[in-house]
Image: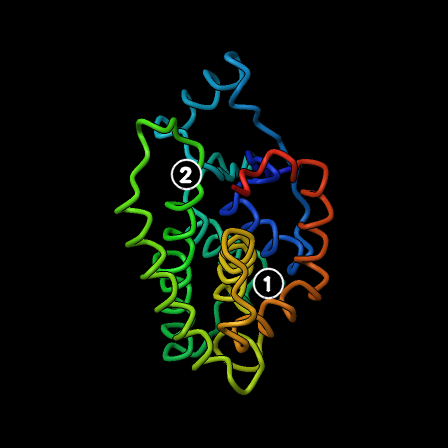
């Protein structure tokens, strides 16, 4: 099989790429990397020195790509069924890319800051950084409420890369601090995302690993 995805089933940016792959029906070989295994970690670091998930390797083309947005862009360029994730219309494509950046930078990263702090030793915790991330996340969720008040998907009626980005970001943000009572529009959008077959499949595959997620 030409495509191989190096991933972990709990890694949120891996979810983003998995959703895109399942949306497009693109065949690939999943390669679960256990970073707790020294040998597996060493092999992964040799391939991608920053050690960040996910990495997609196109073995037939001799190319490899880190970064979830770049991977989805590559899929959209190479596979006709994935082209719908990046609209052909240039103005709409810019909207999709902007929304993708919004969810990655202002929802996803803030959520990861909060989760990451829960995994630190007490002496290493960063309460002021977590408080700042929580405040910025609340602002971002208010913007999601505003933009999603009439339903639909992130940039309109078509499911795109922006929704691939929104799904893991909102799901984990809701695990960190349930927001349904404060952000009804964002909560309804998350419900639509979770009902989408591609994301439902990702969640089902991740379920056996959920006890590894630091909820407190």
Vertical comparison of 146 with 75: above or below? below
Mark 1 or mark 2, which has the lower sequence index?
A: 1
Task: Kindly identify which numbered label has been placed on residue 116.
Answer: 2
Vertical comparison of 3 with 180: above or below? above
**Nearer the observer, 7 or 65:** 7
Q: Secondary structure at mark 1?
A: helix
Vertical comparison of 28 with 88: above or below? above
User: Could you tell me residue 170's position as x and y percent?
Assistant: 52, 60
Question: Which marked residue is nearer to the observer: mark 1 or mark 2?
Answer: 2
**Nearer the observer, 138 or 65:** 138
Displayed quadrant of residue 10 = top right
Q: Residue at the spot x=57%, y=70% of the render?
A: 187
User: Could you tell me residue 203's position as x and y percent?
Assistant: 68, 50
Residue ranking furthest to the bottom: 150
204 on left or right of 67: right
Q: Secondary structure at mark 2?
A: helix
Q: Residue at the spot x=59%, y=63% of the render?
A: 80
């Amino acid at each position: 099989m030409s495509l191989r995805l190096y991933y972990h089933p709990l890694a949120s940016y891996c979810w983003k790429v998995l959703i895109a792959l399942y949306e497009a029906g693109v065949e690939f070989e999943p390669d679960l990397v256990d970073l707790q295994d020294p040998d597996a970690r060493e092999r992964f670091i040799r391939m991608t020195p920053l050690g960040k998930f996910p990495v997609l390797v196109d073995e037939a083309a001799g190319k490899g790509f880190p970064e979830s947005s770049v991977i989805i862009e590559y899929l959209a360029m190479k596979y006709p069924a994935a082209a719908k994730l990046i609209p052909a219309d240039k103005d709409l494509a810019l909207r999709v890319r902007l929304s993708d950046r919004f969810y990655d930078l202002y929802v996803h990263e803030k959520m990861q800051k909060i989760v990451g702090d829960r995994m630190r030793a007490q002496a290493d915790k960063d309460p002021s950084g977590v408080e700042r991330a929580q405040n910025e996340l609340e602002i971002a969720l208010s913007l999601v409420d505003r933009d999603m008040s009439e339903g639909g998907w992130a940039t309109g009626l078509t499911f795109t890369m922006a929704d691939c980005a929104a799904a893991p970001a909102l799901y984990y943000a809701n695990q960190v601090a349930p927001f349904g009572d404060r952000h009804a529009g964002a909560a309804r959008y998350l419900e639509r995302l979770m009902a989408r077959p591609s994301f439902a499949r990702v969640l089902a595959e991740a379920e056996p690993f959920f006890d590894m997620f630091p909820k407190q």
